[in-house]
Amino acid sequence: MLKNLDLNKLRGFERVYARRNLVEAAADLGVTSSAVSQSVAGLEKEIGAQLFLRSGKKYLPTLEAEELRSAVLPLFEGLEVSLSRIRRHRHELEGTMRIGSVPEFGSRVLLPRWREFRESNSRVEASLVFAGTSPLLEKLLANELDFAFIDGSNVVARLEPKLQFREVEQEILDLVCSDAYFRRHVPKGKLGIKEFAALDHVPYHRGYEGVAKWYRFHFGRVPKFRASLFLDHVRGVLKAVQLGLGVGVLPRPLVQDEVAKGRLKVLAPGKRIFSNKILLARPGSRVPNALEKSFVDFVHRAPGPSR
């Protein structure tokens, strides 16, 4: 008998049972009332039992209908779940990515965006490396990463044939110090390059890149300055600055709350805003796949530069 049962007839039966009304059942199924009536009558003939008692416009289920429905309902519910999952998987991306990022951008932007991206793409995986720009570029050239988010750097032009670059964000950077350091060591009045250079500096790694760019932007040259401590992580620089070890160049989103509370002071020779480009870098000869394109576009739609 099972091989002769029509799924459409079972569906018609289930809707009539649920609605107790032929017109409403037909509306649910998007067919005519007569079609549903014929479907129920055909099912009754096939199983040899009456399923409903007619009372005006009401269709009252019999004991046989109750038993049939207890078997049919889990079937339809399971089908709905399976079909929904199949439809979702058809449009869902899958695969693995090897991603690199400078630490601050990775913590502030990449991780939250990855969580959001994976909510609708549960079958994707990624390995994420946090490092400075130079190590990330080396890994890209060695084919150890698929793409990376790096600080704007002078090496970009030199590496352009081997790597391709795309701007993702303008990251505003401030020179900051603790309130205690400001009161003890920062001269009053307008500061020039000589006064800034005399302060203790906490550079992010020995390349002095952030500090050097800050001086070059504001003064057109980089003076000789002293460093009290070298750190290889931007949050380490923040902690050192908070402890009063000197001044450091840090992303504005990382320090703005502390500045607002008066715990940190922003030092600047004028009103010009110093910003650093965050670039997407990937091997120039490699064609990104659909997963990479989708995630990079997703990241690129993140909120713009923090002011």
Image (cartoon, rainbow, N blue to C red):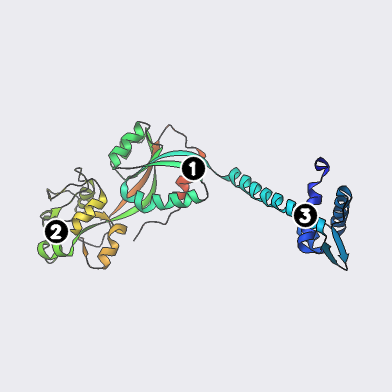
Q: Secondary structure at mark 2?
A: loop
Q: Earlier in the sequence, mark 1 or mark 2?
A: 1
Label 1 neighbour load within 10 Å: few <14, some 14-19, many 20+: some
For the point 22% across and 52% down, the residue is 237
Residue on which disc 3 sits: 67
3 and 2 marks in contact (CB < 8 Å): no
For the point 31% across and 48% down, the residue is 103
Residue on which disc 2 sits: 192
**263 lies left or right of 148:** left
Q: Report the amino acid beneath label 2.
A: Gly
Q: Secondary structure at mark 3?
A: helix
Whole-Å distance between the Cαs marked 3 and 1? Answer: 43 Å
Q: Which mark is residue 297?
A: none
Q: Report the amino acid beneath label 3.
A: Glu
Residue on which disc 1 sits: 124
**Foreground residue among 48 and 195:** 48
Q: Earlier in the sequence, mark 3 or mark 1?
A: 3
The nearer-to-camera label among 1 and 2 is 1
For the C terminus, the image quarter is bottom left
Whole-Å distance between the Cαs marked 3 and 2? Answer: 89 Å
